Image (spheres, grey):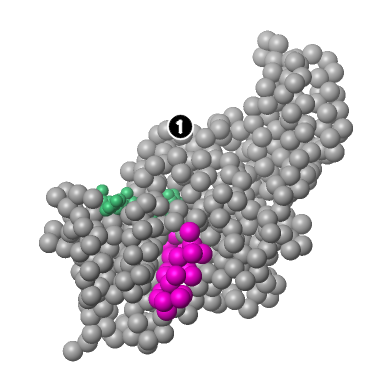
Amino acid sequence: MARTIHAALLGAGTVGGGVYRLLERREGEMVNKLGAALEIKTILVRDAKKPRAGIPPEKLTERFEDILSDPEIDIVIELMGGIDPAKRYVEEALAAGKHVVTANKDLLAEHGFELAETAAARGLDLRFEASVAGGIPILTPLMTCLEGNDITEVMGIVNGTTNFILTRMTNEGTDFADALREAQALGFAEADPTADVEGLDAARKVAILASLAFHSHVTFSDVPTVGITKITAKDIGYAREMGYVIKLIGIARSTNGEIEVGVSPMMIPKRHPLASVNDSFNAVFVHGDALDDAMFQGRGAGAFPTASAVVGDLIAVSRDILAGCNGRVRLNPYRGLPLQSRGNAAHRFYLRLRVEDRPGILASVAGVLGNNDVGISQVIQKQRTEDDAEIVVITDRVQTRHMEDALTIFGSMSVIRDVSSVIRVYSEKP
Ligand code: NAP
Ligand code: HSE
């Protein structure tokens, strides 16, 4: 008779429900696959009376204590989200000698290192593959298959909701609010979708990726973040005319012993592979000294793609339990690289300015940019109304602080009605 490994789910929402159903699908082959059966014994929810399709009500509890005090439960799978009480429950599970699998990037991006230390000190597994890029295997490869490399760049599209919204806005002219509602209905969005559209979810994922790739301590608050709420149909249209597509991009680079991280909308040339990553798909580029470039692409959100990563972790932990070798792989910040000061990071920018329509204005705009070391790559006068003109500028690669100095001066010039948009433009790594 094969052994049964018991696990508990904390949460039975989009991802928890997907995990339960995926394990049911694989139930018949688990003993052959693993050498043991896997059973979800107990499921913690806020409201145990709420009907949940396909989940036996007798497994539901509203008391975490029922899971913590059950000696049969070896693995706790945290799929509730947020920091509190998720952090406390994960800490208590580890203290009780239970392995943890989680999809919670909020928790990992702020407290990943302390939780990893606690798990390692107790010889327990803490796995979190689903916390970045949904179903795409990216964290385990960084921690195992790619360990022989000096990784210098990890960048790409790491939020499914915003990619879905931008794709709908670009390809179908869908309104932002309608596209967001569709993403929520499909289960891609966070409980509070502000985390998606303001780039915070992507910033948490960038912090986790940078920590793993560069073996350094990078947390959520270290990642300068701009979301997609200010992207307009006009910018999408101008980008298209100039041969670009707008995507929300997360970047983690290590250059000259310093780490640059950030999340922002970016104009990507149409020929670049990221430009054709659409809908809820994510894609992550990794550059390593031995590997060169690799791209990981797949579904970044949704019940089953995310469940795929969670169940993969669950099987990995179960294998370690059966082999008696838990706690082998962990977050380890042994390099401790510092963060680059934000103003020194160099980028190209797209600017859309509404200006007074009279002779000499274009020259004044060019003068301010030139005086602040901002080189111009392209300038187009886009549109004239009664007394307004619209100027679109694409800059060369310039230091962020120089760009910011020029924008401050634009803000004080009466002939410039407003700086309507500032969007980064993709440039190859330096
Ligand atoms: P969700 O649909 O909102 O589900 C959350 C579940 O947790 C619900 O079943 C809820 O119970 C339960 N829960 C929340 N707070 C609780 C508490 N204090 N006590 C007991 N139960 C509690 O969320 P989700 O989309 O599945 O996301 C779960 C986690 O996976 C989050 O960390 C998220 O960031 C991450 N994630 C999500 C996706 C995705 O595509 N959705 C992808 C990757 C990672 P009730 O049902 O009773 O309310
Ligand atoms: N809300 C997240 C997204 C879920 O849209 O990518 C996957 O982490």
Residue 54 seen by the camera? no
Quadrant of the frame with the C terminus = bottom right
| Front position in the image: 47 or 180 | 47
Residue 203 picture location, percent across and down: 54, 50
Q: Would you identify the image quadrant in which residue 78 lies?
A: bottom left
Q: Residues within 10 Å of mark 1 (few under 14, many from 20)?
A: some
Tell me where residue 98 appears, x and y as whole percent: 33, 72
User: Left of 197 or right of it: where is 103?
Assistant: left
Name the residue rendered at 54%, 40% in the picture.
Answer: 227
In the image, is residue 80 above or below residue 374? below
Of residues 190 and 101, which is closer to you in this image? Answer: 101
- The secondary structure type at the circle numbered 1 is loop
Compared with residue 180, is residue 309 higher up or lower down, i.e. above or below?
Answer: below
| Residue stretch in magenta | 111-136
The residue positioned farthest toward the left in the image shown: 58
Q: Residue furthest bottom?
A: 1
At 37% from the left and 76% from the top, the residue drawn is 317
Q: Is residue 178 visible?
A: yes
**In this picture, is 43 found above or below 343?**
below
Residue 248 in the image: state x and y as whole percent: 56, 46
- Report whether 43 appears left or right of 172: left
Could you tell whether 158 is left or right of 90 in the image?
Answer: right
Q: Is residue 156 left or right of residue 81?
A: right
Figure disc tally: 1
At 37% from the left and 87% from the top, the residue drawn is: 323
Reply yes or no: does residue 123 show up in magenta: yes
Residue 321: x and y in percent read 35, 82
Three-letter residue code for mark 1: Asp
Task: Report if residue 339 lies within the magenta region.
Answer: no
| Residue in the picture at 72% in, 57% down | 429
Q: Quadrant of the N terminus?
A: bottom left
User: In this figure, which residue is indicated by the disc labeled 1?
Assistant: 175
